[in-house]
């Protein structure tokens, strides 16, 4: 609940008032750090992340997916004011979106890998 320019938060059992400006800077710093890590990994492309696969995807793709979901969760948590809601509503909104987005990304990347293999090999024969 907003009270003028202050947000009420519980911190270690005591009431703490945090102004909007420090909250915005905190969100900016967290999202910037995650984005900088993503960009750095995209530029550097470490071999151990690009050479190894897990569930038909490179580990680097998994790192990008996880960091993107973390950013989406944090944006939902902060800008949609989910931290102030009851836990049932928080779980129903946030976890549903997280699982559906993760599932969609997984399906798209697995199918994209299949299509890539089809074009690379020019022909894949199925024995039914």
Image (cartoon, rainbow, N blue to C red):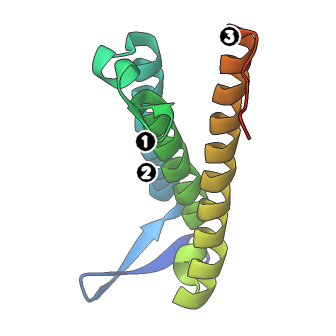
Residue furthest to the left: 12
Contact? badges 3 and 1 (CB < 8 Å) = no
Q: Quadrant of the N terminus?
A: bottom right
Q: Which residue is located at x 59 percent, y 85 percent?
A: 85
81 to the left or right of 67: right
Q: Note whether 48 is above or below 93 in the view shown.
A: above
Residue assigned mark 3: 121
What SS does tag 3 mark? helix
Q: Earlier in the sequence, mark 3 or mark 1?
A: 1
Rendering coords of residue 67 (x, y %): 47, 43
Residue 121, image quadrant:
top right
Quarter of the image with the C terminus is: top right
User: Can you give x and y, in whole percent of width and height, for residue 91 in the image?
Assistant: 56, 79
Coordinates of residue 35 in the picture (x, y in percent): 49, 32
Mark drawn on residue 26: 2
Q: Residues within 10 Å of mark 2 (few under 14, many from 20)?
A: few
Sequence-earlier tag: 3 or 2: 2
> How far is mark 1 from mark 2, CA to CA?
5 Å
Q: Which residue is mark 1?
A: 29
| 2 versus 121 height, above or below | below
Q: Is residue 120 left or right of residue 30?
A: right
Residue at screen point 43% across, 68% down = 18
């Amino acid at each position: 609940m907003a009270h003028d320019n202050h947000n009420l938060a519980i911190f270690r059992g005591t009431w703490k008032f945090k102004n909007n400006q420090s909250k915005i800077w905190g969100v900016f710093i967290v999202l910037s750090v995650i984005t900088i890590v993503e960009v750095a990994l995209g530029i550097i492309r470490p071999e151990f992340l690009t050479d190894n696969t897990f569930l038909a995807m490179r580990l680097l793709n998994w790192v990008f997916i996880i960091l993107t979901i973390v950013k989406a969760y944090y944006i939902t948590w902060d800008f949609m004011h989910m931290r102030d809601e009851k836990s049932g509503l928080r779980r129903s909104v946030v976890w549903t979106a997280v699982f559906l987005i993760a599932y969609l990304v997984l399906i798209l990347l697995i199918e994209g890998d299949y299509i890539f293999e089809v074009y690379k090999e020019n022909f894949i024969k199925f024995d039914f």
